[in-house]
Amino acid sequence: MSDSYRQPGVVLTDRRFTVPLDHADPAGETIELYAREVVASDKARQDLPWLVYLQGGPGFGAHRFVGRQAWLDRALKEFRVLLLDQRGTGRSTPANRQTLPLRGGPVEQAAYLTRFRADSIVRDCELVRREVTGGAPWTVLGQSFGGFCTVTYLSLAPEGLAAALITGGLPSLDAHADDVYRAAYPRMERKTAAHYARYPQDVGRARRIAEHLLAHEVTLPNGYRLGVEAFQSLGILLGGSEGSHRLHFLLEDAFVPTPGGPALSDAFQEEVQGLLSYASHPLYALVHESIYGQDERPTAWSAERVRAEFPQFDAAKALAGDGPLPLTGETVHPWTFDRDPALRPLRETAELLAARTDWTPLYDPARLAVNEVPVAAAVYHDDLYVDTAHSLRTAHAVRGLRTWVTDEFEHDGVRAGGPRVLDRLLALTRDEI
């Protein structure tokens, strides 16, 4: 049963689908997926081609638009759009500290979560596509991790695609997680330096907050234990188009005077907990490194291990001198599961995933080399979250893929650039540029 309703300029329909938990066992256990169909009000009765949107993450449900915001406005001029909550996210059988105990203990939970990677998401899409399009191929728009899924789609089921559009999400086809993070930490260092160059007053502010956290135990209102490493991870903001400015405003009013001396303000703590908590997207923390698992090597807390190769990120050493505090971002660490109350019950599950040695390949280089699907990808120069060099190597490995390399946008360009970004990618797939 579907429910339809309206927002300004659009008709929305809630869609639900039943798919196998394990696509290798189609007669076995099933899970429910949710997607929101969106069509322009004046085209609601027209037979339009479909575009399915795959959100970034992993672990985030599809963006909840109001009306015709951002890129959706351009898409609705010619497509009927399906905003899919990928399995385990949003309203698609969510996986979190509350629901995962239904599977059993950590061993059962970890085994369950191995079926929440890009290959399962693509096979979900193929079942959904046959139901909503009657078997006709559709266009996929993949943002960030959604772009990773799109490359998996081109590897596993290219026959389901009329075109593929990727924004900030061309993955390396063969890099281990260690390779990904060895490329990421220098990028983070550059982004931090650029932020401090823009806002030199933030050097002292960040140092003061870090020094306070080294001397005091701070527990945020939601129970998150804020330490220096967690504070440093607010550098994840620097990957967004407005992120540097948001970070500046966060830092400028961190302290208030109290009878016991300066303390981190309630307002600061409230905003920080919203930025650091994984309560709304726990899968991001649980399976983040597994998106790079493709062989018998464990990911083994790669971001934590590789960080040790970059001693400049050690906060205590940085504060012992007079230089700026380095910031980090887009990494998950063992301490993340100790500090965040939304993740603490899942620590052992995360350990089992980190130790796993039977990851299967997500990409098929041979099939990509003979690709016939029109593909266009926006590659953001010095993208914080996805290494540009890795993306360009993959672009050369996919036959016919056309790139738009730009420094006009950061990683969130498909939202910040809105219709213009989508228009450019569509034009590239149609040889109009």
Image (cartoon, helix red, strand yellow):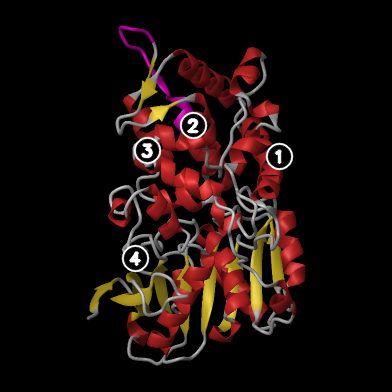
| Up/down of 205 relative to 20, above or below | above
CA separation in Å, label 3 and label 1? 30 Å
Q: Amino acid at mark 3?
A: Arg
Q: In terms of sequence position, does the residue under pointer 1 or pointer 4 come before the other?
A: 4
Quadrant position of the N terminus in the picture: bottom left
Q: Nearer the viewer, mark 2 or mark 4?
A: 4
| Up/down of 8 relative to 293, above or below | below
Label 4, on which residue?
Answer: 92
| Residue 131 appears left or right of 428 | left
Res. 417 visible in picture: no
Q: Residues within 10 Å of mark 4 (few under 14, many from 20)?
A: many
Quadrant position of the C terminus in the picture: bottom right
Res. 49 visible in picture: yes
Identity of the residue drawn at 57% across and 46% down: 239
Q: Are marks 4 and 3 in contact (CB under 8 Å)?
A: no
Q: Tell whether position 201 is magenta.
A: no
Which x, y percent locates residue 193? 67, 33
Instruction: Identify the mark at residue 186; answer none if there is no mark.
Output: 1
Q: Residues within 10 Å of mark 2 (few under 14, many from 20)?
A: many
Label 2, on which residue?
Answer: 230
Label 3, on which residue?
Answer: 344
| Up/down of 423 relative to 354, above or below | below
CA separation in Å, label 1 and label 4? 36 Å
Query: Element type at marker 2?
Result: helix
CA separation in Å, label 3 and label 2? 15 Å
Number of dots carrying numbers: 4
Q: Tell whether position 258 is magenta.
A: yes
| Residue 150 appears left or right of 30 | right
CA separation in Å, label 2 and label 4? 29 Å
Query: Element type at marker 3?
Result: helix
